[in-house]
Image: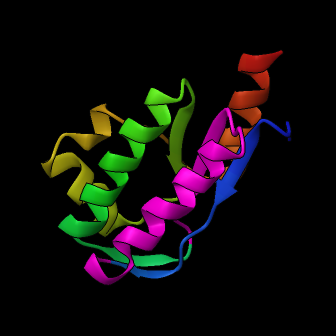
């Protein structure tokens, strides 16, 4: 995978207690010059509105830096949260990291 792509893989429950740390990790990746950030939700069991808010703020940070933020491997609960809030139209969502890699490689070649 290209070195322009950084993967962030949060774990457990993404809620108010983890939201600011999550945003900080994404800001750090942007500061390090990441052009594309992929958030792999494979190990996230639950996300609430605080986690979603952190994700939206992170998206603004990433876009302001001229980079891209994408997500993959969301579970059914997160998928429903995205659909209820129309975030499924805002974020580019991939089924898995492999799905992202094959599509991203095709886009960037």
Quarter location, residue 16:
bottom left
Q: Is residue 58 above or below residue 19?
A: above
Instruction: Tell me the quarter of the image containing the C terminus.
Output: top right
Q: Is residue 5 above or below residue 39?
A: above
Residue 105 seen from this side: yes
Front residue of this view, candidates 33 and 93: 33
Expressed as whole percent of the image width and height from the top left, the position of residue 49 reads 19, 65
Range of magenta residues: 15-42
Q: Which residue is found at the position 61% from the left and 55% from the top?
A: 28
Quarter location, residue 78:
bottom left
Q: Is residue 65 above or below residue 16?
A: above
Instruction: Tell me the quarter of the image containing the N terminus.
Output: top right
Q: Which residue is found at the position 49% from the left and 62% from the top?
A: 24
Expressed as whole percent of the image width and height from the top left, the position of residue 58 reads 41, 48
Q: How many marks?
A: 0
Q: Which residue is found at the position 13% from the left and 50% from the top?
A: 84
Expressed as whole percent of the image width and height from the top left, the position of residue 53 reads 25, 57
Q: Which residue is found at the position 30% from the left and 66% from the top?
A: 51
Front residue of this view, candidates 38 and 76: 38
Q: Is residue 104 magenta?
A: no
Q: Is residue 5 above or below residue 44?
A: above
Left or right for 32, reference 49: right
Q: Residue furthest front?
A: 31
In the rendered view, how is the structure colored?
Answer: rainbow
Left or right for 86, reference 88: left
Residue 40 seen from this side: no
Front residue of this view, candidates 22 and 86: 22
Left or right for 98, reference 28: right
Q: Residue furthest left?
A: 84
């Amino acid at each position: 995978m290209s070195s322009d792509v950084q993967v962030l893989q949060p774990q457990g429950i993404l809620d108010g207690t983890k939201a600011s740390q999550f945003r900080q990790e994404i800001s750090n990746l942007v500061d390090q010059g990441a052009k594309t950030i992929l958030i792999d939700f494979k190990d996230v069991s639950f996300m609430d509105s605080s986690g979603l808010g952190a994700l939206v703020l992170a998206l603004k940070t990433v876009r302001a830096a001229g980079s891209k933020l994408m997500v993959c491997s969301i579970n059914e609960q997160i998928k429903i949260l995205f659909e209820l809030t129309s975030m499924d139209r805002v974020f580019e969502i991939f089924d898995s990291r492999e799905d992202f890699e094959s599509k991203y490689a095709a886009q960037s070649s």
